[in-house]
Amino acid sequence: MSFNLLPAKNGEEPTMQFLLEVVDILTNYVKKTFDRSTKVLDFHHPHQLLEGIEGFNLELSDQPESLEQILVDCRDTLKYGVRTGHPRFFNQLSSGLDIIGLAGEWLTSTANTNMFTYEIAPVFVLMEQLTLKKMREMIGWPNGEGDGLFSPGGAISNMYSVMIARYKYFPEVKTKGMSAAPRLVLFTSEHSHYSIKKAGAALGFGTDNVILLSTDERGRVIPADLEAKILDAKQKGYVPLFVNATAGSTVYGAFDPISEIADICEKYNLWLHVDGAWGGGLLMSRKHRHKLNGIERANSVTWNPHKMMGVPLQCSAILVREKGILAGCNSMCAGYLFQPDKQYDVTYDTGDKAIQCGRHVDIFKFWLMWKAKGTAGFEQHIDKCLDLSQYLYNKIKNREGYEMVFDGVPQHTNVCFWYIPPSLRGMPDGDERREKLHRVAPKIKAMMMESGTTMVGYQPQGNKVNFFRMVVSNPSATQSDIDFLIDEIERLGHDL
Ligand SMILES: *Cc1c(COP(=O)(O)O)cnc(C)c1O
Ligand SMILES: *[C@@H]1O[C@H](CO)[C@@H](O)[C@H](O)[C@H]1NC(C)=O
């Protein structure tokens, strides 16, 4: 029983025994994750899991359960989950299972502390400062100067950027609220992740004041459209505040032309944010970092190491070029946490810069991975993933039964394509074909999940019916896994 474990008297022995058994479950899971004969998932519908399966029951109990049952619960929780580290899991921008990162996460949970003060997280706070500086150097800000924080994800990092921009131009909003500001408008790509609209709504701008920018056929913002929309907004008496350029859009993997957008932002005195949640990792690659040229002119950058760099969830940074503004925007100087008269340099109490109070330690696993791989290791990882997606692109671009969603080599690892089953191949383009094609990807995906062999995402975009979006960020994937995915799509989709 759990009451035999520490801190119980004589609890060391049962505690060690219990933890070793847990470690045994975890390491078995890790081994199997990399074994291609293991399925990616064992799919069950919500009602099946809620009803309970063979001794695994989600109901909470009034009475303590045995440690044997607790171990079964641990094992089954993993069993009915999805192996996001499996070499054939391509469903999400974050995938893979990095062993050093995993060890980092274990250590983090063991330390169980909070990032808000140096007082209780001295080592982690310094690691965070140092890593953020290194990231700012890679962005190209002079001497890595500036500020930043790890936040609970790219959507939150993006929200920070909007808050800081507003504080920069209209600091009185902090105390007086939005009535102290004119009607402010934000600009972002029509291909934007929905997080910008969310930020617009949550921060009181209103989604109507988030203006969407037209993109070219590859999903890149057209700078001339930005300028036209800025002028249009000004003419209506609105105040343009913020432009969000994307480095690696979620669906197409498009990189907006940052330099040209920066020129326009300078001309009209707008805040430039670069959302590199997905594409930021390419800064680590000498071969691919040119895709982010101009990022050094941004006022703020979102960069998620938990996506392209394979750091375990969560790990996302908001980086800011101007020092002090993050604190200016968010600090409330709570006397019970941030006493100014501590015995150490209290600028290391980073908690007041955050919109959260408590903050999880996201830095350690990332710092440890960087130590273990070196910058060179991240570069290899990124180059390898981009090579693999190029392999996929070359394989299907002229293959019978495939159509690419946009022409040309993808800029990121996103390869967007339709699989056309034989029954649709001769059919003339029109509503009937579109309706049928729209149903193909969801059907294949459902069968894929039932058979548990692989996972890949799909979605519609604008007037384009459902297509597959393949992404590679998993370092364990190889060309044979890409071949497998294509075989599987054809096996499952052939008779549709
Ligand atoms: C994933 C993504 C986000 C959101 O990041 P989370 O960490 O999931 O909150 C924002 N922008 C882009 C471009 C993304 O791909
Ligand atoms: C910026 O745009 C990108 C995609 O184009 C989107 O993912 C992100 O959420 C947007 N962020 C902000 C703060 O506008």
Image: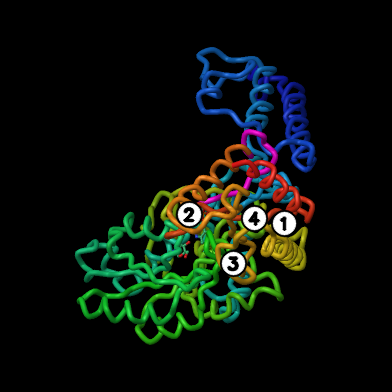
Nearest the viewer among 292 and 487 is: 487
Which residue is denoted by mark 3 in the rendering? 280
Please state which amino acid type lies under the numbered disc 3.
Gly
Within-10-Å neighbours for mark 3: few <14, some 14–19, many 20+: many
Which residue is denoted by mark 2 in the rendering? 465
Q: Do the residues labelled 1 and 4 touch (CB within 8 Å)?
A: no
Secondary structure of residue under mark 2: strand
Q: Nearer the viewer, mark 2 or mark 1?
A: 2
In-image side of 413 versus 24 (left or right): left
Please state which amino acid type lies under the numbered disc 1.
Met
In-image side of 256 versus 228 (left or right): right
Nearest the viewer among 347 and 396 is: 396
Within-10-Å neighbours for mark 2: few <14, some 14–19, many 20+: some
Q: Give the range drawn in magenta.
A: 448-460
In-image side of 177 versus 439 (left or right): left
Nearest the viewer among 130 and 215 is: 215
CA gap, disc 3 and disc 2:
29 Å
CA gap, disc 1 and disc 4:
41 Å
Q: Nearer the viewer, mark 3 or mark 2?
A: 2
Marked residue nearer the N-terminal end (2 or 4): 4
CA gap, disc 2 and disc 1:
40 Å
Q: Where does the image place residue 390, in percent across and percent down from the top left?
A: 70, 65
Q: Residue 401 carries which label?
A: 4
Secondary structure of residue under mark 1: helix
Nearest the viewer among 19 and 476 is: 476
CB of residue at label 2: within 8 Å of ligand 2?
A: no
Which residue is denoted by mark 1 in the rendering? 369
Secondary structure of residue under mark 3: helix
